Amino acid sequence: MKTIVCMKQVPSSNEVRLHPVTKTIIRDGKASVINPFDASALEQAVQIREKLGGSITALSMGILETAELLRDGISRGCDEAVLLSDCAFAGADTLATSYTLSLGVDKIGDFDLILCGKMAVDGDTAQIGPELAQTLGIPYATDVIEILEVDETKITVKRGIDGGTQVITLPYPALITVVKEIQKPRLPSIQSIGDSLQKEITIYTAPELGADETRTGLNGSPTEVVQTFIPENKVDCVELTGSIAEICKSIATIRQEVK
Amino acid sequence: MPQLIINKELCRGCTICTRSCGSDALHMRGRLAEVNDNCILCGICVKSCPFGAITIEKEEKINTEMDAYKNLWVFVEINQNRIAEVSLELLGIGRKLADEKGCHLVAVVLDENALLFAEDLISYGADKLIVCNDKGIGIYAEESCAHILDDLVEKEKPEIFLFGATGVGRSLAPRVAAQAKTGLTADCTVLEIDGDTGLLRQTRPAFGGNIMATIVCLAKRPQMSTVRAGVMAKMEYDRTRSGTIQKVSYQNQLPEAKRIILETSFAPKTNSITDAEFLVVVGRGIGAKKNMKLVHTFAEKIGAQVAVSRPLVDMGYAEYPKQVGQTGCTVAPKLLISLGVSGAIQHLAGITRAEKIIAVNADDTAPIFGISHYKVVGDCVAFLKEYTKD
Ligand SMILES: Cc1cc2nc3c(=O)[nH]c(=O)nc-3n(C[C@H](O)[C@H](O)[C@H](O)COP(=O)(O)OP(=O)(O)OC[C@H]3O[C@@H](n4cnc5c(N)ncnc54)[C@H](O)[C@@H]3O)c2cc1C
Ligand SMILES: Nc1ncnc2c1ncn2[C@@H]1O[C@H](COP(=O)(O)O)[C@@H](O)[C@H]1O
């Protein structure tokens, strides 16, 4: 059983502010973490391997620094890690990202199951899973909340749908995207952290992947940000003042007025 | 290859760009900013520079085949024998955009019983229906739907294609976009037509912060977006409208589905916060988890339901269906009482349709006050204790 887990590096905090004077964008604190959904996906993959044996490869497209996060992934249980890193990948939207990841998958080769997070918390687009599955031409299930059965040829999952749930069987090769709650990521042991330091992270550049550079990065991204702005809010606001008791009274009155 | 260019004449060495960068790609060399290989061309520094010193240089994308793409399509979901509310809302915004563009609004309905809904869809704005009512077809025959949509997009060439950001929409739209090799913008909160270019301007909160970004899809078609339920307004039902129906059939023509659906079950509809007339929305300012008890007592007392901001879902104070915001539910109560919520853009995206908002926040400058009708500057826990005292 060969599993690939797609892992994305995301900023640890989403605090992006406006400069008070120049009104331009500032972001303080640059620490990065593994997208929490992907950490859960990795834990799920580890549990599948505990049952069926086989190997787990972590796959990421990102800047070179992402190698450190992949090392963290190794300490939490993946056997190998592959990083796709090249200037030609910069500025990728979801279409270009899924194309690039598909090349990484081809390079790893011969897999049974791919796990993605349901979404990455920096953008919440939740598009990479289905786009990658389509690019690879394999069946997929989004929003998986539980693995019901898994063997060497197929996986049966429960997924969330609008207003309910669905149980689906997917024959391999297949892709699933998982919710964060599917498993709680384990903490790496001191031993496994030590071991992970010895491991090589495989890094592939665009030429090594045989990438068509009109399909990667900014070149391969049909979408483009043309404007950014802070919306203006202009509601007339009345301040309720007085003692707490008085404020409660005012609120009770407003509640009564709204029928 | 596209790259980031820093104009040395214009750079004043203010360091704002280095602080705007989320990838550690900008550093100062002396009094000038300099970019390194970490750059992911996200463009945030371009917008951050007060002096316009940063630009991204790239090749112009021109695609002459694009002119063949016409009309605005909406993917209509029939779920549990009803038209999903979000599909009607998409027809509402779609009608407006189609009128601005002077094109047709087409509803695509893939469902065994699709024809039962034809009149309603036309009355809610569609000019034309593309219907596939083959036996067994429906939104949960997702693979078949995907193949049908691929084929329709290729043959009929829609210029714009809108999906609800429902479970089905979020699974199907990226799948269809990848096949068409086009862009897809998730969770748009505003859709407009650019007066000059006729392009679809898709606006959503972006860069993970309190910033809105307007996105266009330049050189690929269709231009695709998903929109959450409750964000757009549906049209008044207009029985006098007329429209045409194009029936398509794919019987025995589709590749066999690989996924096997063993069971589809629907939970009984619980009180959803989307329908609530009175709503209490709680944020991180509530403090300890035990304070949620106070919240529920308060809500019961005033006959309201309880919803939360995203961090409270992350912390396990409430379940995801109770989350309001861009990536949760959009709510439209008559009265919304917001307690300890800062009012981040992603949160506001979910509550702007509330008729009246009372906000309690300890910080006088919290952005939530910007959209509130009544503000209380103070401790929400103390307020709850007082209100629920007897
Ligand atoms: C892609 C993406 C999607 C997102 N989607 C959503 C979404 O759908 N919904 C959502 O809500 N968020 C969403 N977020 C998160 C959003 O950006 C904010 O981080 C979040 O809304 C903040 O929640 P909060 O207001 O509860 O917490 P905080 O921002 O921490 O605010 C707490 C507030 O409580 C006040 N406070 C503290 N103590 C007290 C007290 N005792 N009494 C009164 N007030 C007090 C503080 O002054 C502060 O204003 C998303 C973020 C990203 C990046
Ligand atoms: N750059 C990337 N490298 C590896 N995996 C990614 C990358 N971007 C997204 N993914 C995967 O796709 C999932 C959904 O991401 P998104 O579509 O960006 O919300 C994530 O949880 C990851 O599993």
Image: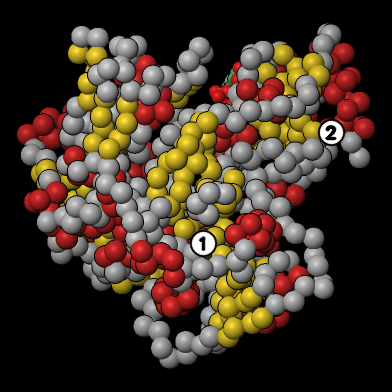
Q: Observer-nearest residue: B200 or B321?
A: B200
**Vertical order, A95 against A38 (above or below):** below
- The colour mode here is secondary structure
- Helix, strand or loop at mark 2: helix
Q: Label 1, on which residue?
A: B160
Residue B36 can be seen in this image: yes
Quadrant (top left/top right/bottom left/bottom right) for the C terminus of chain A: top right
Give residue A146's position: percent from left, percent from top.
43, 56
Residue B111 can be seen in this image: no
Q: Tell me the residue at 12%/56% (across/down).
A: A210
Q: Tell me the residue at 11%/31% (across/down).
A: A197
Q: CA distance from mark 1 to mark 2?
A: 45 Å
Give residue A189's position: percent from left, percent from top.
21, 32
- Helix, strand or loop at mark 1: strand
Image-quarter location of ligand 1: top right
Query: Residue B385 vs residue A17: left or right?
Result: right
**Vertical order, A170 against A32 (above or below):** below
Q: Label 2, on which residue?
A: B302
Quarter of the figure with residue A134: bottom left
Q: Are marks 1 and 2 on the same chain?
A: yes
Asked if the residue at label 2 sits under 8 Å from ligand 1, the reply is no
Quarter of the figure with residue A154: bottom left
At label 1, which amino acid type do we have? Ile
Q: Tell me the residue at 48%/30% (across/down).
A: B209
Query: Residue B273 vs residue B102: left or right?
Result: right
Circle 2 crowding by C-alpha within 10 Å: few under 14, some 14–19, many from 20 = some
Asked if the residue at label 1 sits under 8 Å from ligand 2, the reply is no
